[in-house]
Amino acid sequence: MPLDTPGDATTVSDTKRGPGASADGRRKPEVKIVSGNSNRPLADAIGAYLKLPLTKGQVKRFADMEIFVEIQENVRGQDVFIVQSTSFPANDNMMELLILIDALKRSSARRVTAVVPYFGYARQDRKPGPRTPISAKLVANLIERAGADRVLTLDLHAGQIQGFFDIPTDNLFAAPVITRDIEEFFGTTEDVVVVSPDVGGVVRARALAKRINAPIAICDKRRERAGESEVMSVIGEVDGKRCILIDDIVDSGGTLVNAAEALLKAGATEVTAYITHGVLSGGAVNRIQNSRLKSLVTTDSILPTEAVKAAKNIRVISIAPLIGEAILRTSREESVSSLFY
């Protein structure tokens, strides 16, 4: 028998929609939400937003950590959404997602949507050199071959990853959630500048700046010589301004910390960072706590660690309402993109 249960899969019925009957007299498919073990609190919060009671399933492991899944509710002909980030431990969570998809397809679910708030391997979206993989494409192939009918994800590191799938893929944006938090904590934005920590994030910074009606600036990092530390140059006017650094993924935190230091040297009065995916591996939390960042705000797309929860200058905001609304609209065949415009 399987051993060492780290958590349960959960399924829920969409009472908002109601089972009812379709125009042709057939029973309308119910919505089921299945949660893996990567981020159970987020799945619970999504269920709470949709006002749906969670029912039980099982995601267990054998003694050698082999994954075993059993969905303990009828899903035949139903519209099923699996909530599972592929964050640390990335490979375990990825296999769990694939096995959940397979279990649901073999249980005759009508449609299976992989809801992947944090899409692991997204930073490997191209060949940076000879004889290197494009791992994001491989992961897309695995999810598709496992039997997923569509994918719903959040702030992909590279937008072109949507094209790696041959099934419908919705890339949600955390910008509306971040914008509401900025409006609540910053009040007026007359003295605010949105800053991209590198040249590659300019589009993201511009989109947020447009939402809050603020100018943008860019931190340009470079190394003069191999082996020398990087130099940050600030492009744009930040003197006397409150700066908001915006990024999608923060792993080690080094770039954010260096960007904050450069902005303060350029005359910024304070620096706050907003990110979507708080990977925060290794000594990142300590690095952030000991930095000159006023605060780092991250979403709960990745389950916050105890260190993150204890950090005085790191705050977590929830994306459950955003994902819950996207799930509801997908199940009703309504527009998802209208959430962002």
Image (cartoon, rainbow, N blue to C red):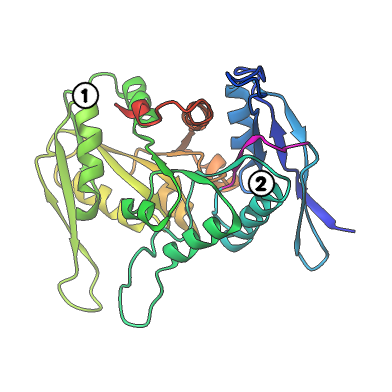
The amino acid type, in three-letter code, at marker 2 is: Gly
The amino acid type, in three-letter code, at marker 1 is: Thr
Closest to the observer: 172 or 147? 147
Q: Residue drawn at (35%, 31%), measured in percent from left and top?
A: 337
- N-terminal-most mark, 2 or 1: 2
209 lies left or right of 149: left
> What is the count of numbered marks?
2
From which residue to which does the magenta span run?
A: 74-84
Q: Residue drawn at (62%, 53%), measured in percent from left and top?
A: 97
Residue at the right extreme, as displayed: 1
Residue 140 in the image: above or below residue 248? below
Q: Is residue 290 visible?
A: no
Q: Residue drawn at (21%, 42%), measured in percent from left and top?
A: 195
The residue at which mark 2 appears reads as 36
The residue at which mark 1 appears reads as 189
Residue at the bottom extreme, as displayed: 131
Where's the N terminus, which quadrant?
bottom right
Return the x and y of residue 189 as percentages of the image width and height. Answer: 21, 24
